[in-house]
Image: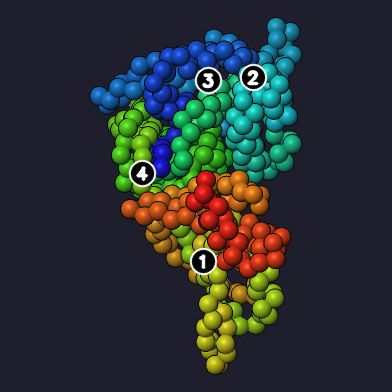
Amino acid sequence: MKTLYLDCGMGAAGDMLAAALLELLPDPDGFVEELNGLGIPGVRFEKETAVKCGITGTHLKVTVNGAEEGDGLSHEHVHEHVHEHADGSKHHHHSSLHDIEHIVRGHLCLPTSVQDHVMAVYGLIAKAEGAAHGMSVTEIHFHEVGTMDAVADITAVCLLMDRLRPDQVIASPVHVGSGQVRCAHGILPVPAPATAYLLKGVPVYGGSIRGELCTPTGAALLKHFVTRFGEMPVMETERIGYGMGKKDFEAANCVRAMLGRSEGSADEVLELSCNIDDMTGEAAGFAMEQIFAAGALDVYTVPIGMKKSRPGILLRALCHGTEKEAVIRAMFGHTSTIGIRECRVGRYVLERRMETLHTPWGEVRRKISAGYGTERKKLEAEDLCRIAREKGVGMEEARRLVEEWEKTK
C-alpha cells in the first residue's frame, strides 16, 4: 500500500505542506513551473532552499503582486483588506466563497478532480470561519492578499496529492503551539478559533513553543486529506521531504513528509457502546442504519442480560475520531439510551481493492484483501444474488458459474 506519512510535530501551514510534498517529486523545479502556469491571479511561486536547526529542506515562497503574506499575522482568513485613497476614502477588497469558486473553476488549468478538492478544502475553511465569527458560510468574505495566498497553497497541495496518489495518508498528532497570535481582528489565543474548530476530533497538543504552529489552511488540508491520525506505521520509506516555515524556533520549523509502502495498515478507532432494554427490534435496526449514515465504520448488537433480569442489547459503533460527534448524536438521537461509553482500540486491516469481472451474466465485482502474508478474494454477494434471480438458481450455484467461467478464460 502506497503510504504518505506527515510529521506535524511543528504544526502545519499550507506552504509548509506544499514544500514537503514538493520534495517527494522527481522533478520539483518542473512542478513549480507548472504551478506558475496555472494562472492564479497575481501569484508567483518560488522554490527556495532553507535550513532549520541544521536540516536542509524547501521553502515554497508565494508572492501576490510581488508581496508575501505578512509575517507575524495569523492566517485567519475572514477580514477585509482596506486600501485608503489619497482623498481619505477607503476601498474594501474581499472575496466570497462564490468568488473563490469562480477563480478555481473558471480560470485555473486544473483537472476537475483537483478543482473539487480545492473547493472542498475552502468549504471547510469557510465553515470554520463562520462558526468562529458567528456568520453563515454565505456571509464569509476573505481578504484579498490572503485569498490568493491561500488559493495558491491549497491548489499546490491538492495538485501534489493528485500527482503522488497515495493509497492512505497518515499524520501525527498536530502540535498547535501556545500563547497568543495577532491578526486583523486583534489578539487571539493559539490555536486560532477557526483552527481549533477545524481540528475538532483530531489529536492535538500544545507545548512550550510560543506562537501559531498550525494555521487554518494547514488544518483544513489535514482534515480533508488525512485518512487517520496516529503513530507512524511500519513502512518501507522511499522518499522524504522537508517543508520549511519562515520563522525560527528552538526546534526545526518544518513539516516532514515520508512516502513509502506499508503492508496492510494499523490504526486506532473509537468504540462507542450503550446498553438498551426498551427498544423494539425494528427501532434498533433503523437506529443502526442512521448510525452507519453518520459515519460509523461498523455497527453491531450483542444480546445481553441487564439489571432486573431484563434481556437487552449491547449496541456498539466503531468510528474514527473525526466522525465521533456525528456518531454520538446519531446514537442519542435514534436510540433510547441516556449514556454512551467510549474506548480507544487498535485495529489492523488488510489492504483492500475492488476489481470487476465482465462475465456472460454481466459485471461481477470482486473484493481483494491482502497484507500480513495473506490474500483473500470474495465475489460481491449482491452481484451473485442478481445472477441467481435471473437464472432461477441458488446463490452458491451462481458463485460456481462465475468461478468456472473464470477458469476457462
Q: CA distance from mark 2 to mark 1?
A: 44 Å
- Residue located beneath label 1 in the image: 272
In the picture, the quarter occupied by the N terminus is top left
Q: Secondary structure at mark 3?
A: loop
- The numbered mark, 4 or 2, whose residue comes first in the sequence reads 2
Q: Which residue is mark 2?
A: 108
Mark 3: amino acid: Glu
Residue that numbered label 3 is attached to: 69
On the image, the x and y values in percent for residue 302 come to 53, 77
Q: Earlier in the sequence, mark 2 or mark 1?
A: 2
Q: CA distance from mark 4 to mark 2?
A: 35 Å
For badge 2, the amino acid type reads Leu
Q: Amino acid at mark 4?
A: Ser
- Mark 4 residue crowding within 10 angstroms, few (<14) / some (14–19) / many (20+): many
Using the image as rendered, state which of residue 264 and residue 114 is in the foreground: 264
Which tag, 4 or 3, sits closer to the chain's start?
3
Please name the residue that numbered disc 4 is placed on: 262
Q: Earlier in the sequence, mark 1 or mark 3?
A: 3
- Whether tag 4 and tag 2 are in contact, CB under 8 A, the answer is no
Kindly state the secondary structure of the residue where label 1 is placed: strand
Q: Nearer the viewer, residue 130 or 8?
A: 8
Of the two numbered discs 2 and 1 in the rendering, the one whose residue sits closer to the viewer: 2
The answer to whether 179 appears left or right of 282 in the picture is left
- Contact between marks 4 and 3 (CB within 8 A): the answer is no
Q: Is residue 22 above or below residue 210?
A: above
The one nearer the camera, 327 or 74, is: 327
